[in-house]
Image: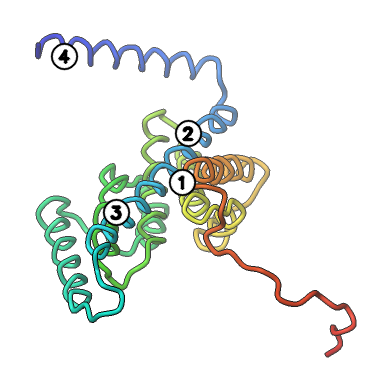
């Protein structure tokens, strides 16, 4: 059985290696990045959906049977438990610093040739979902942005993309993460331009848009069309009020 599994994995590796050789000969880097950016959009949207689903599941599991009219002192205890569980997970399983998500992305771009460790594609999801699900006072944006950037970086390395393209894929991953979790594709592009400070050229804007639109679309398909922050206009806009 082990021998069969080894042969299957060897066959898959050889098949993938042949694909890489075929891609180098027949598809230019600037064209292939459009395909990879589409894949990044799908993966980052899946990561955002998984993160939100785990958070809601934990919250429902812990507080679903609470009496809304009475005092629930477990609300004071749950955040402490969540922080302890996340701390143990990071210390004994991850064994790496996964905090300061955006800072780690900027450091990877400037000092590590846009290479982000593979475990960042899932460890931030686990740690943040446990912390937030138990009521911890943290946000999901930085963890999902680091997760998205790690997905873009590692997919780019898997397909042997150049360093400049790898940096763009890191930005695509971050944009897809924002677009997927907020269902706002333009917000993802703006985040990358303003926070990660990537140059917005014609060769970079298209992959960013593809990733953002793909991530938002996938998120809409699986989580519904309702906006994350809905609003309604209470008063009609009156142009005569502009001087005031």
> Mark 3 falls on what kind of element?
helix
**Going by the image, does 235 lie left or right of 204?**
right
Q: Residue 6 carries which label?
A: 4
Toward which corner of the image does residue 238 lie, by quadrant? Answer: bottom right
Q: Residue at x 85, y 83 (%)?
A: 242
Q: Distance between the residues labelled 3 and 4?
A: 37 Å
Task: Say which label, 1 or 3, has the lower sequence index.
Answer: 3
Foreground pick, 49 / 15: 49
Q: How crowded is mark 3: few (under 14 residues within 10 Å), some or many (20 or more)?
A: some
Q: Whole-Å distance between the Cαs marked 2 and 1? A: 10 Å
Q: Of the residues under marks 2 and 3, which one precedes in the sequence?
A: 2
Mark 1 → mark 3, Cα distance in angstroms: 25 Å
Front label number (3 vs 4): 3
Q: Mark 3 points at which residue?
A: 57
81 to 45, vertically: above or below: below
Residue 209 pos. (x, y %): 61, 44
């Amino acid at each position: 059985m082990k021998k069969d599994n080894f042969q299957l994995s060897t066959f898959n590796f050889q098949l993938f290696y042949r694909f890489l050789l075929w891609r180098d000969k027949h598809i230019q880097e600037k064209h292939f990045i459009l395909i990879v950016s589409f894949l990044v959009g799908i993966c980052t949207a899946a990561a955002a959906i998984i993160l939100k689903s785990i958070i809601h599941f934990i919250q429902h599991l812990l507080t679903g049977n609470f009496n809304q009219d009475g005092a629930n002192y477990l609300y004071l205890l749950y955040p402490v438990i969540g922080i302890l569980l996340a701390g143990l997970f990071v210390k004994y399983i991850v064994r790496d610093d996964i905090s300061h998500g955006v800072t780690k992305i900027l450091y990877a771009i400037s000092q590590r040739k846009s290479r982000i460790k593979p475990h960042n594609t899932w460890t931030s999801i686990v740690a943040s979902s446990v912390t937030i699900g138990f009521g911890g006072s943290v946000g999901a944006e930085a963890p999902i942005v680091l997760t998205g950037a790690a997905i873009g970086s590692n997919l780019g390395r898997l397909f042997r993309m150049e360093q400049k393209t790898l940096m763009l894929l890191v930005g695509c991953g971050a944009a897809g993460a924002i677009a997927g979790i907020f269902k706002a594709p333009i917000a993802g592009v703006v985040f990358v331009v303003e926070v990660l400070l990537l140059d917005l050229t014609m060769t970079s804007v298209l992959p960013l848009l593809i990733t953002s639109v793909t991530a938002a679309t996938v998120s809409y398909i699986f989580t519904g069309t309702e906006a994350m922050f809905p609003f309604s206009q209470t008063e009609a806009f009156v142009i005569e009020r502009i001087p005031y």
